Image (cartoon, rainbow, N blue to C red):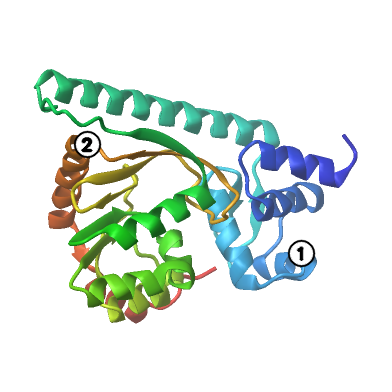
Amino acid sequence: MTDDSEFITKLINFGLSEKEAQLYFHLLKYGPKTPSLLAKSLKTYREDVHRTLNLLIDKGMVNPSLDSPTVYSPVELDIALDAALKRHETELRMMDQRKQELQELSKQQLFRPSDEFSTFKILKRSGDVLSMILSTVASTEREWVAVMPAITLSYHPYVVAEEDIKFIDRGGRIRFIADITYPYVEAFQQHLNAGIDIRHFDKYAGLLFFVFDRKIGMSAISADVKRVSLDEPVNVLWTDDPVYAEYLISTFELLWKRATPASQRIEELLKAGPPDI
């Protein structure tokens, strides 16, 4: 394979975002570089490069040096791809564990008889998930809660903030839990200013989900939560089954008790300043 774009496309098909694929390919082709040189070569902002590098580090595809300025090196392709496969295997094991937990709940007869049938459906595109959230928020009366990645809140103000404000104005309550990190401080502060109650859960890596009025639940079966795009493939379960919604709410309340107020976390991050590159 000699064509650069074909190689990058294959990386994207393997699960990388376009920016991740381009940056990783650039390091493979031209060798280790600093963020400044990468930004210049890729004709983008240094902050954007730093964000993408952190995502690639999390995926085991890039290693930073210990000296200053930091130089980033690509992990050998075969090793990086093997690490990605192992992550998917881990995700499958986690899903199997969640399946067993739900089956155990069923054995405890938590599913009460009803003349009404619950609906279950799988949303397979980020844009479909967003549309479902918007329509559900519009019909929610009391409260909706969510455990979500910080990157979701970073773009959230530009698409649904108006619906959130309307909901709060009519007496509704919104609570979010997320792992708050420095790049998203401003977005979190905007949500706090709007009246949304947010707490920080350090290095949270569990189930991502939404619950509306303790009746409707949405949970991520699989989703690349480290990037945001309306066309990204996802697998998100949507259901109006109240028992599953109660299960999610119970999980949320346990996390909420252990989480730190967002204002406290933001103050700590601002005092510490941006992380060194």
In-image side of 177 versus 20 (left or right): left
> Compared with residue 129, is residue 277 higher up or lower down, i.e. above or below?
below
Residue 178 appears anywhere in the view: no
Tell me, yes or no, if residue 243 can be seen here: yes
- How many numbered marks, from 0 up? 2
Secondary structure state at the residue bearing disc 2: helix
Residue type at mark 2?
Tyr
Residue 3, x across and y down, in percent = 89, 42
Q: Residue furthest top?
A: 107
Residue in the picture at 34% in, 78% down: 189
Q: Residues within 10 Å of mark 1 (few under 14, many from 20)?
A: some
Q: Which mark is residue 244?
A: 2
The reply, left or right, for residue 168 in relation to residue 37 is: left
Numbered tag placed on residue 117 in the rendering: none
Q: Quadrant location of the N terminus?
A: top right
Above-or-below relation of 66 to 245: below
Compared to residue 8, the image places residue 271 above or below, namely: below
Disc 1 residue type (three-letter): Leu
Which residue is denoted by mark 1 in the rendering? Answer: 42
Residue 47 location in percent, x, y? 59, 71
